[in-house]
Amino acid sequence: MQKTYDDIVASHDLTPLEITLENGAVHTGLFTEWRIDRKTLPEGKFAYDIRHGDEDWSDLCQLQPFVLVNHAGTLVTDDPIPNATDGPIIEEWSYL
């Protein structure tokens, strides 16, 4: 099920998250376990789905523009993440 960006903001269901990708790039944004309807994102916001591992739902392991299977949540950023379409591996992550 998808929610609108405004619904997620209104429900305070966004947690600051920092991820480090396999290339060493560090990105921060707001994380929600919901799928966000991309058409409802405000201008200047970018959304990326995060995949969890097969064995551990709390293991955030890959970033992609869209995840169908093993969807852990969605990361909303103020800046685009280069090469996100390549599905970079998340090496480290932490809630801020």
Image (cartoon, rainbow, N blue to C red):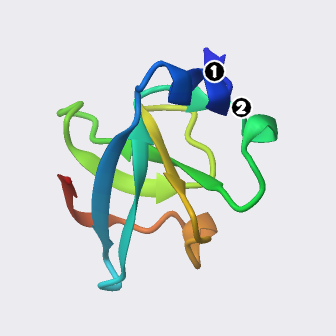
Task: Please tell me which residue is depicted at 53% across the width and 30% down the height of the picture.
Answer: 9
Give the side of residue 29 with respect to residue 39, left or right.
left
Helix, strand or loop at disc 1? Answer: strand
Residue at the disc numbered 2 = 37
Q: Position of residue 44 (x, y in %)?
A: 71, 62
Q: In which quarter of the image is residue 82?
A: bottom right
Q: Which of 34 and 7 is in front in this view?
A: 7
Q: How far apart are marks 1 and 2 (CA)?
A: 6 Å
Task: Please tell me which residue is depicted at 19% across the width and 35% down the height of the picture.
Answer: 58
- In this rendering, the count of numbered labels is 2
Q: Which of 80 and 1 is in front in this view?
A: 80
Residue at the disc numbered 1 = 3
Query: Disc 1, disc 2: CB below 8 Å?
Result: yes
Give the side of residue 27 with respect to residue 93, left or right.
right
Q: Position of residue 59 (x, y in %)?
A: 20, 43
Q: Where is residue 2 in the image (x, y as percent from the top left)?
A: 64, 21
Q: Where is residue 83 in the image (x, y as percent from the top left)?
A: 58, 76
Crowd class of label 2 (few under 14; some 14 to 19; many from 20; radius 10 Å): few
Q: Quadrant of residue 90?
A: bottom left
Query: Looking at the image, which residue sits at the far top?
Result: 1
Q: Mark 1 belongs to which amino acid?
A: Lys
Task: Please tell me which residue is depicted at 68% across the width and 25% down the height of the picture.
Answer: 4
Helix, strand or loop at disc 2? Answer: loop
